[in-house]
Every structure is written in C-alpha cells, then in structure tokens.
Amino acid sequence: MADMRRLALVSRASSLLSAPAQLAYDLCKGHTSAELIRSRLGLLNVPKSAAWFHASSVGECALAVAAASAINEAQLASDEDILSSALLTSWTNQGTIWARRRAAPQLNPGIKVAAVDAVWNSPRAVRRLLHRVQPKATFFVQSELWPSMISEASSFGCHLAVIDGRMSERSLRRWKHYASNVARDMLSSFNVVIASSESHAARFKNLGATNVVVAPSLKFATAEEKTPQVDEELSAALQSRKTWMVLWFTNCLIGDPTRRLRSAPRGALHGN
C-alpha cells in the first residue's frame, strides 16, 4: 500500500532538484516563450477534460493518441459518449507540436484533444493544472513516473493508469538501489499498469505495482509501413487494448464495474 505522506514529502523534495533542471533545459533549448512558461507553471487556460494523457516526446505522444483513438473508435461504434475532450501533455515542445498537428485529424469526429507542454515536476504547478482540467483519469505513457504528478493526481482523486508500460532491467536496478520505497509508493498508487510484455509486467510488479495486466504494445498502431505481420499484430493489439481501455475508462466515469459497452469485444488480457 502506498504511503501517501511519504510520497508527498518526496514530491516536494524532488521538485527542488528537477524543476530547476527542467527550467535549465528549456533555457538551453531556447524555449522561453510566454506560453511555454505559463504551461510549465500550470497557468494555461485549458478546457476541462475527463482524461489527462502525459507523455515524454513524439513517440510517446503517438502512443497516447493511439490509446485515445481506441476509446474514440468504440464510442463512435456504440453511439455512447464516453470521452468528449482530453488533455495531452508532453515534456518536449516537439511532442506538443506533433500532437497538435496529428491528434485533431485522427480523432475527428469525436474527442477534442488539447495538447500543451507539460508542467514542471512541482506540486504547485501540477495542482494548478489539475484544478483547471478537472480530470477523472490520468494516463502515464510507458515509464513517465514523476513523484509530483502521481502524488498530486492521486490526492486529487484521479484514477491512475500506466499505458504501454515499459521498465528496463537497468531502470529496475536503479529504482531498487536508490529509491525502492518511493517506487513502491508511486506504483501502488496506480489503479492499473497496462504493461507491453510479460517481462515489463514482472519488473513493474517487482517494484510494487499491485494491479498489472499485459496487452500488446500500441507501437503497432503508429507504424508508418504496414506489413501483413504488422497488420495482424496491429489488429490483435488494438482489439485487446480497446477492450481494456474502454471498459476501464468507462468505469472511471460512471463507477459501474459491471457495465460493458455494446461494441466492446471480449478480448482477453493477462492479469497478475
């Protein structure tokens, strides 16, 4: 079980180091626009959205859009309104620009996605963003584990999920050696970790994740060139992921674990 008081203390302490480092990175890259700074501080006027997707850069943003597309496809097929708007944040400006160009066409008609630069790893900045967006569910793509975001989103009452979760052996060793308790507090805060393979799932469990399932990686949904093998794997991956994402997100919104969308397939996922 997560020690939320300890996680909150770690969140404040980590922000003293990471937030200045993130500011230095922006300055070195020449990212000094007023809009970006306001975004980093959680001060942008963004629309309220039931879902918040957080990604690192272009590749992870593509995975987030693929996940949102799975939800969008299901709600269009079932004629049920699950998600009308979503927020997508990216650490890199390239990711934000990509999402603004690609998310709107891919999710039209359906979900309206607002793409902005991510807030710094600061409790106050994250709280500002949460109060503006009012999300019910927060999705962290792959291995984006930041104490302030996780602590504040959990305290705000969000349902938390890792999608396309990945954890390398090297990352596992580092977490275990330097911050095993912090890793356990963060990962046990998640309602679900959707890992991209059995090996990644095992590493998440090793660090303290308590509800881990395995679904095929969404990387197939972003492949530029489709081969027969990729098409077959893509079909299986999206059907499996669509089942899980739609049902999990619907439960977040209506709190009814027994409800199933009429269009949702009964694809199997591997649980822990």
Image (tube, helix red, strand yellow):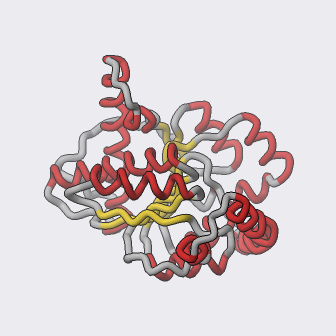
Vertical order, 215 against 149 (above or below): above
User: Could you tell me how many numbered marks the image carries?
Assistant: 0
Can residue 1 be seen? no
Q: Is residue 164 left or right of residue 6?
A: left
The residue depicted at 23 percent of the width and 50 percent of the height is 74
**Screen quadrant of the N terminus:** bottom right
**Residue 230 quadrant:** top left
**Residue 156 quadrant:** bottom right
The picture places residue 271, in percent across and down from the top left corner, at: 48, 40
The residue depicted at 78 percent of the width and 57 percent of the height is 181
The picture places residue 44, in percent across and down from the top left corner, at: 49, 78
Q: Nearer the viewer, residue 231 or 169?
A: 231
**Residue 254 quadrant:** bottom left
Can residue 14 be seen? yes
The picture places residue 83, in percent across and down from the top left corner, at: 29, 63
Q: Is residue 110 left or right of residue 172?
A: left
Vertical order, 193 against 5 (above or below): above
**Screen quadrant of the C terminus:** top right
Farthest-out residue, right: 177
The picture places residue 268, in percent across and down from the top left corner, at: 36, 35
Q: Nearer the viewer, residue 96 or 168?
A: 96
Farthest-out residue, front: 30
The residue depicted at 56 percent of the width and 70 percent of the height is 36
The residue depicted at 49 percent of the width and 37 percent of the height is 214
